[in-house]
Amino acid sequence: MGLCNSVEFQSDMHLVIVGGGYGGSHLALQMMKANICKVTLIDPRDAMFHSIGALRATVDDEYMKNLFLPYESMIGDSFMRGYVENIETKSKILTLKDGRTVAYTHLVIAVGSRSNFPSNLSKDYPDVNVDEGKEVYTDYREEIMKSRRIVLVGGGAVGVELAGEIKTDYPDKSVTIVSSTDYLVSSRTKTKFQRNLLNVLRAKEISVILDERVSNLDELIINQTKEGQIVITEKGSKVDADLIIPCTGTRINNKFFQHELTRSMNAQGALKVNNYLQVKGHEEVIWALGDVTDVKEEKLAYHAQRQAEVLAANFKADTTNSKRKQYKTGPFVIFVSVGRNDGVGQMFGVQVGSKVVKKVKGKDLLARKTWQVRGMTLPGT
């Protein structure tokens, strides 16, 4: 969805977007095309990280070229590299880690969430550049290649999809998923989805332990190959491991605003927003989108991009005194890849199998679409 360039440029409006992930980068591009106002996107990295494909990069060196979308190529001078450390809502000023300040009239917070490597870089490697990021994944592939027995702690989408990637490229390795819940991926999926997923995993000889929480994770060496480790659950199960990969622990990136916007946060640290994605208590000045919001839906790239399109349309509507659009959550849809060729999905309550999942997601993990939506050409094509 695009915005036509028919609105007079608002010289007194400065839209600052903090966070250049799927939602933030999409909003920046939409607003730049509309040419409504000055737009600045701030992110600590020099490129957008295609986290949907991160797990494939742990086993496939060729996929590495798809992971990083340079902001300079994407949005040019509208990009500012930096780490926002503080916000002053009264003066409408952001302070960066290096001391620079940025004034805004309109602020969109799109900083997302952080999770354990290798599913994301934001927690352990928040400000790496493209070359450094590639080196991190190259080194990690060596760890996976060296290991024989791999245990994934966490039965969410990350644990399941990483297990599939490893088993697809290394079918002789022992791979075990340990989940603290009695289901995999999401409690919103139907029983048939769970049954289909378990069947796909078993067909690939991936072991699954459900409803058992790991009790000794803090005592183990994670993300590094070390023979002789034993993963122990609270119920007493023991699994031998050479490589232990944490696939849990997603947290909202709320550090820079948690003091100033504390009254606008819920108990989980997310920003409370209204139907227009305005941060409650700071309407008309601060908006939020993606993982950082309390919108009750699955935190997916697709949803963040839909939210970005609603915000872009509303910023344009404000300049023409037109009616704003409310953001409405969509139906529950989920696709889980288990390697390049297998997977399960649920669309509007209907179950779909490997053929559909491969076509929609598994073949390239949405790399081509991610680049194309941002007006960029996927490397090597």
Image (tube, rainbow, N blue to C red):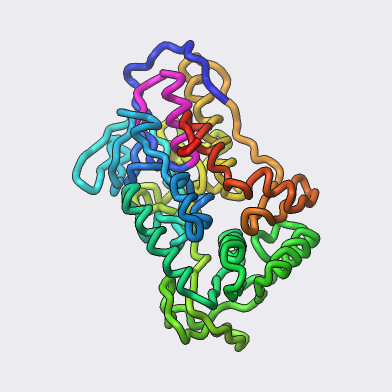
- The residue located at (44%, 62%) in the rendering is 117
Above or below, comparing residue 378 to residue 65 in the picture:
above
- The quadrant holding residue 191 is bottom right
In the image, taking residue 191 as reference, residue 312 lies left or right, namely left
Q: Please give the count of numbered marks on the rendered protein.
A: 0
Q: Which residue is found at the position 47% from the left and 84% from the top?
A: 229
Q: Nearer the viewer, residue 290 or 159?
A: 159
Magenta span contains residue 26 = yes
Q: Position of residue 296 (x, y in %)?
A: 61, 48
Q: Percent from the top left, x then y, of residue 185?
A: 64, 61
Res. 147 visible in picture: yes
When the figure is inspected, residue 210 is found, relative to residue 186, above or below; the finding is below
Of 42 and 157, nearer the camera is 157
Q: Main secondary structure of the magenta part?
A: helix
Between residues 369 and 91, which one lies in front from this camera angle?
369
Residue at image position (64%, 59%) is 338
Residue 186 colored magenta? no
- For residue 208, side relative to residue 59 (left or right): right
- Name the residue rendered at 42%, 23% in the picture: 32
Give the x, y percent position of residue 158: 56, 60
Magenta residue span: 22-40
Question: Quarter of the image containing the N terminus?
Answer: top right
Query: Residue most toward the left?
Result: 99
Height in image: 192 above or below 29? below
Q: Is residue 61 above or below residue 95?
A: below
- Using the rendered image of the protein, determine whether residue 265 is visible from the camera's viewpoint: no
